[in-house]
Image (tube, rainbow, N blue to C red):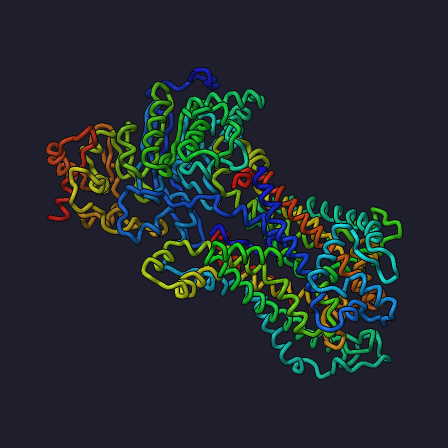
Amino acid sequence: MPSRQSPSDGSETRSAQGVTTQQSGVRPTGDSPTPILPAASPASTAATRDADTDAGDISGSTGKPRSLFTDALFDLRRKPMFLIPLVLILFLAVVAIFPGLFTSVDPRFCQLSDAAKGPEAGHIFGFNRQGCDTFSRTVHGARASLEVGLLVTVGAVLLGAIVGAVAGFYGGLVDSILSRLTDVFFALPLLLGAIVFLSSFPNRNVFVVSFALIVLGWPQIARIMRGSVIGVKDADYVLAARALGAKDRRLMFRHVLPNAIAPVIVVATISLGIFIVAEATLSYLGIGLPPTTVSWGGDINSATDALRTTPRILLIPAAALSITVLSFILLGEAVREALDPRLR
Amino acid sequence: MTTSVRIDNPGSPPEPGHALLEVENLHVEFRTRDGVAKAVNGVSYELHAGKTLAILGESGSGKSVSAQAVMGILDSPPGFITEGKIRFDGQDLLTMSEKDRRTIRGERISMVFQDALSALNPVYSVGFQIAEMFRVHRGASRKEGMAKAVELMDRVQIPAAKGRVKDYPHEFSGGMRQRIMIAIAIALDPDVLIADEPTTALDVTVQAQVMALFSDLLKDSNTGLILITHDLGVVADVADEIAVMYAGRIVERAPVGEIYARPAHPYTQGLLASIPRVDRKGQALYAIDGLPPTLTRIPKGCTFHPRCSRVQDNCRVDVPPLYDVGPQRVSACHYWEDVLAETATTADADALTDGEPSSVRTAQGDRRG
Amino acid sequence: MGRYVVRRLLQMIPVFIGSTLLIFLLVNLTPGDPLLNLAGDRALDPTVRAQLTEQFHLNRNVFLQYLYFMQGIFTLDFGTTFSGRPVLDIMKDAFPITIRLAVLALLFEAVVGLPAGLIAGLRRGKLFDSTSLIASLVVIAIPIFVLGFVIQLFVAIKLGIGSPTVGVTTPWKDLLLPAVVLGSLSLAYILRLTRTSVAENARSDYVRTATAKGLGRKRVVTVHLLRNSMIPVVTFLGADLGALMGGALVTEGIFNIKGVGGTLFLSITRGETATVVSLVTVLVLVYLVANLVVDLLYAVLDPRIRYA
């Protein structure tokens, strides 16, 4: 329990060191060592432990026992803070995969004669400074953002989870080496590191940008995974499985990972939003996706000079970007709240 | 040494024998998303100056919650006192203003918690935390406070107190930390001291030392002690009176000698039977069948009936009142006479060994018969 | 305490070497002609090519190149820009401005974020708590360049509060609005961090002990609850000072501030990669040092760590 970091509370992008040190092993566990009163049956000890002082435990033991995940799901089904972003994300996914459903205007068809023209029939958001249809570009821009966000998240989670799980599970020298390696990559701030990498990279595309963000984004996942695995691997049920002769691989996949993955899922969801921001910022700076790719960041960049005259050109892709990111962050936040019993 | 720390309480100290603290029909519930958990359901007891009342019960029986209600430190929400009175020195604590209550808290009623490591603030020295009592309640200066802290640490028998007063809680062993907790609790010479499982988190040898310290500190004082525990062994030597709690109710209350010799409630009987004893080596340890009830769904009638071996039809319907079953003792069992009669016959036969409280063999005979 | 400091410093060495090596590799192992990459969009005339080859020691092997790179860092020789001005010279002018901006942003974060987080934490689940939590998520979700333009447009241009661009002399009052933009993201984090920390500690045993000792509500909160809850927050603020220097990139670009970020922003848009790399390297170093200071600060604040 103490190893679970609350991802959106500041430890996310930086300074995780401080927060983790505080949480490691300072607090004792709440178990009372030798209960002398009769425990009516072995199964009752867990249910009754500490119920005396903690009302949360009293309530937790009602009804049929639910696992953390089913309990969380049960909780989430009724929460608008979960359902609204979920629906938005599904909608965005449809927009990204089938932009043609929403607009038949070619986002790359631009006529300078239309530059910065206001809304008209068939062009509800008007035209941008190059005379391209703003609505169409905003619809088509979803794909780049979601592609990068998804690619980076999958890549960073795979890489980070493997490194973190191995470091946490095996400990010792392996842990020391992997942890220092993680520190090295963690020391590079996401944006600055990506700038260094991409500014000297000639032909950028979705994959290059994603690669840069994966290289810089995985350490955070690794740290959380490591902490989570360490927290779980010494749990009694893992020790019991080990004592029964379970092999490392089985222990890892059967007992440790399923119980350690929850914080990673939460951080991954929120990170997806953060990676989309990073891509947009890079594209805005002109060192992310190339101008040939339709992207929100790029469109915002090209609209900056028109801020005073036609702010609409900038605000529309900006709104789309912000809503997308907010959806992922809200979703991650809702999942985190549901998975963290302490917050109830 | 002891007198030097004492500073006289404002007002006259309560006379010995007079009921210092009266808890009357106390009800506490926790309102959670899964329903209302009724943690305390009509608890009444009295504490007299200079006496020790032990409140005995399993986890979830409401013993700590009732103490927190007395102390005024219930987490609220979710905890609410829904009914009852708590009178201290004749004043009702529950209707009192928060300001008045605060002058009583810590100064006249104080508390020792179970886990001293988490109950002490990790970022302040132990000296600071003891001295705080004098600085806040007595207006002492920082220096005076620290001097008092050293005296108190001496009094709770912490070696080299002077050198350790600036150390932090994590630098002490579990037993020493609990002594610091006790030092804070007795700092202002309270009238009532509530010790909530003070030895549970400690090693067995250290448990004995800490209990000895309690007896030592309270030997000649008028302080009334409420000792909350689930450990029957801890209670026997120190307590004057024992109250046994089950599912938020007191099911039996009696002077200490009597309850061990002749329990008048089947639950108490079961508890005593489940103590491991050297003279019964080789025999299976007794255990009460079933689980304590979930506090959101407390059984009708006698709360203990689902686990009781002598349950009758009316136990499932009628809530047993506290029957007077002897001088200064009550039992919440419709069939207390049967229980008492049964335990009486065996109690005489059961020899007291090494001054240990006698236990009850019949319960075992009953079940295995 | 001493041992902890020494250990942290020793641990810092491999991280320092590793991160600088990483920056170096990120720059040098990209495909293509490194000089062409470094030159960005510009045509490369032979003099510049020779100068760059010399500056980056491209005629030596990779290991030596790294050593030269490190030598440059330690001797504060960060090379020159395309216009021939030493990067160090630019930094001397730019850093004071960025530090001023970062300090303002930090003040804004602390003054608004801490009390708001404290109130939210103490009134968990109440209206203020849920509103500020959602508001903070919205702020986190809005990219800083969007926020920058929105504030520039609506506050500075439409409402006329503050200045949409910062004057040449960089007066303090012109920096207020950029500082709000720069600090807003961290403000949201600080609010949430304080709130979580306070809410968690409020239920801790030692806060209950403090109440049981008969201390007043104010003393319980300020002396016992706040002191403990501040530990992660203060360390965040410390690390944030380092991060803000880098984060100033976008903000300074938008408000046309001639700080490190503004210079970096211009270098990026002009494709002056060599300058970009030098500036980012320095910013990363600042960030590393800030993190180290924070770790040490942490030991000062939490007595439990000193002996760990």
Number of residue marks: 0
| x, y percent for residue C102 | 75, 49
Residue C214 visible to an observer of this rendering: no
Q: Is residue C36 above or below residue C112?
A: below
B219 or B207: which is nearer to us? Answer: B207
C16 or B185: which is nearer to us? Answer: C16
Q: Is residue A24 above or below residue A72?
A: above
| x, y percent for residue A209 | 68, 70
Q: Is residue A94 left or right of residue B200?
A: right
B348 or B33: which is nearer to us? Answer: B348
Residue at 76% from the left image edge and 74% from the top image edge = A291
| x, y percent for residue B232 | 27, 36
Q: Is residue C181 above or below residue B239?
A: below
Q: Is residue C94 above or below residue A88?
A: above
Residue at 13% from the left image edge and 37% from the top image edge = B341
Q: Quadrant of residue B80?
A: top left
B7 or C126: which is nearer to us? Answer: B7
Q: Quadrant of the N terminus of chain B?
A: top left
Residue at 37% from the left image edge and 18% from the top image edge = B15
Q: Is residue B267 left or right of residue A82?
A: left
Residue A208 visible to an observer of this rendering: yes
| x, y percent for residue A14 | 63, 54
Residue at 42% from the left image edge and 29% from the top image edge = B179
Q: Is residue B131 left or right of residue A95?
A: left
